[in-house]
Image (cartoon, rainbow, N blue to C red):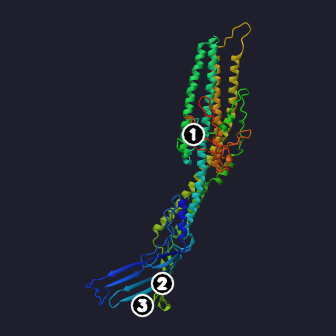
Amino acid sequence: MYLAALDLSLERFAFGPQFFATQQLAYEHLGRLLPGGDPATGRPSHLTLAPGPDGNVVSPGETANSVAPDGQSVDSFTGPGPFEGTGFGVSRLFATGGALLLQFANQTVFEFSGPFEGTYSQSDATLQLVQPLLQGGGRAVTLEPLTQTERNLLYEVRSYARFQREFYAGIATGDRLTQGARLEASQNADEDDDGVRPRIGLLPLIEQLQVLRNEVRNLELLEAHLRRFEALQKAEEVSLIQLDQVRQDVAQAQARVIRARRRYFANFDRFKIQLGLPTNLPLVLDPSVLAQFQLDPETCELPKLAAELQDLNLSAATAEDIALENRLDLMNQRAALVDYWRKIRVAANGLMGVLDVQYEGSWLTPDPNVTSRPFDFDGRRSAHRIRLNGELPLVRIRERNIYRGTLIEYQQARRRLMLAEDTVRLEVRNSLREFMAARETFAIQYKAVQLACQRVDQTRKLLDLPPRPGEARELGTNSARNLLESQQDLVDAQNDLVQAWVDCLIARIRLQRDLGILDVNSVDAIGLTGFTLDGFTPPANDGLLLGNPEFQNPEFDNLVTVVTADPSSTPPIDPPVPVDIPGVGSRE
């Protein structure tokens, strides 16, 4: 964006007054035997002050990056440069293609000896004005490079604003940043019913942390069941086979905790790389967002989590209209089509003949051999000339090819715009379907957790039933298996629930991004509100508390802290309370 602004500044400067001044100082000495070297008859030594090389004139269209982002370029009328031997002057290019050049040149010679000893000085003032009437003339042709650079700067501003939204969505969801990469990933995901789940990103890490907590809690419950079955086996109320089944499930749960822990911390390090942070930087994740997944074992309810998600009440046609109106990349595509349309007019100008009106005027001071008066200009020592330069358009093969090429490029740009609009419609429709599917899946998984919790409660109550009077209690052969299966189904349902909840948030962010309405400066841009109850406050967008010295536990030195605070206020400096995961480790 800054480079585009630099190009624009140079193009604008090309249409302003451009001053230049050059001077050369030359001392020459001739030997006696060379022609003119005899002190009595020639000029053996003299010092000359004369105009230097050509001055610097910036012409429109000469910047290195003045072409459009899609490679459009145009040749335009650049105007005449300074005369040879320029001393001091100013040039100006007008929007109509006319060019004005005013120059002042002076030559002063100091003779040190000989018959010409003395000082000789003469000046020359020149005015030149050129106005093309056909080829190279007109505002459309002359201002085209400036117009293109101005529009290029606007394109870069839009692209940067679009990148901010894509980057924010990528950090939150773990999605890829480019549109093509996301479409390729979604197409490849069709090969797998589960699709491609992101590993890094704030929301995926929240999911992985909750899965780790679920697995740890499941391990604790299984260890409690193991102690109970060991007591029952000693009382010969269950068989050794059922006890071994419980031991086997405990071992499997321990392995699952290890895998979940390794997955979470490894992806957390990748998340730091995604943020551009060193992997050894201690960060902590605020677990307050996970409080809504606390299951009440008595009622099998999640009191802080909404069972029903808000419906968008947004049809596919309405979503497409919103995206077509707000997508910044589509705005650039439409503007590029207008650029190609302007190029047609510029290329058509090259098919015309040449007809230029040129005026040249010059004024001289008196002959220095008579008198040295370098500023004594007189109209009697002036010359004026008006010329009309013309060329019939007899040979225009190159210009014809350029013109027809611009016509083809315009049609190609039209088709690219159509493809871009269709691609945006595809993205919006896919994002809307994903959100609706995620919302329905969340409602299903919410009920699945309740049913699984009820199964665990029922199987546990069966173990607590007292024996009949006068009979020894003997549990059935499937008692352990029923309890273990229900417990495993519960932890699977809890993991699926947090996955469905994260999928809802990710789908909502993707939909807002694809609609072009994602507000990265909003507290609720991440989409946490609207899906919870009891006044849960979403974390601030910039809520990262870095370098906390309180967390030295190796299990927690790679966690992120998302501070729940007003983003307009100063972030708190007190260390947050770390999440307490039994069996994993915590620090007060």
Q: Residues within 10 Å of mark 1 (few under 14, many from 20)?
A: some
Residue 68 picture location, percent across and down: 53, 60
Answer whether residue 337 is visible to the viewer in this image.
Answer: no
> Which residue is the site of mark 2?
125
Instruction: Identify which amino acid the numbered label 3 is placed on.
Output: Asp
Instruction: Residue type at mark 2: give it.
Output: Ala
Q: Is residue 351 left or right of residue 25?
A: right
Helix, strand or loop at mark 2: strand
Q: Secondary structure at mark 1?
A: loop
Q: Secondary structure at mark 3?
A: loop
For this rendering, which residue is in front, 17 or 440? 17
Mark 3 neighbour density, 10 Å: few (under 14) some (14–19) many (20 or more): some
What residue is shown with label 1?
198
- Where residue 376 appears, as percent x and y from the top left, is 48, 89
Closer to the camera in the image, 222 or 204? 222
Foreground residue, 499 or 539?
539
Q: Nearer the viewer, mark 1 or mark 2?
A: 2
Q: CA distance from mark 3 to mark 2?
A: 14 Å
Quarter of the figure that contains the C terminus: top right
Residue at screen point 73% across, 33% down: 303
For disc 3, the marked residue is 367
Image vertical order of residue 78 relative to residue 357, above or below? above
Above or below for 565 versus 71: above
Foreground disc of the pair 1, 3: 3
Q: Residue at x 67, y 40 (%)?
A: 436
Residue 432, horizontal then vertical, whole percent:
65, 44
Mark earlier in primary sequence (1, 2)? 2
CA distance for labels 1 and 3: 86 Å
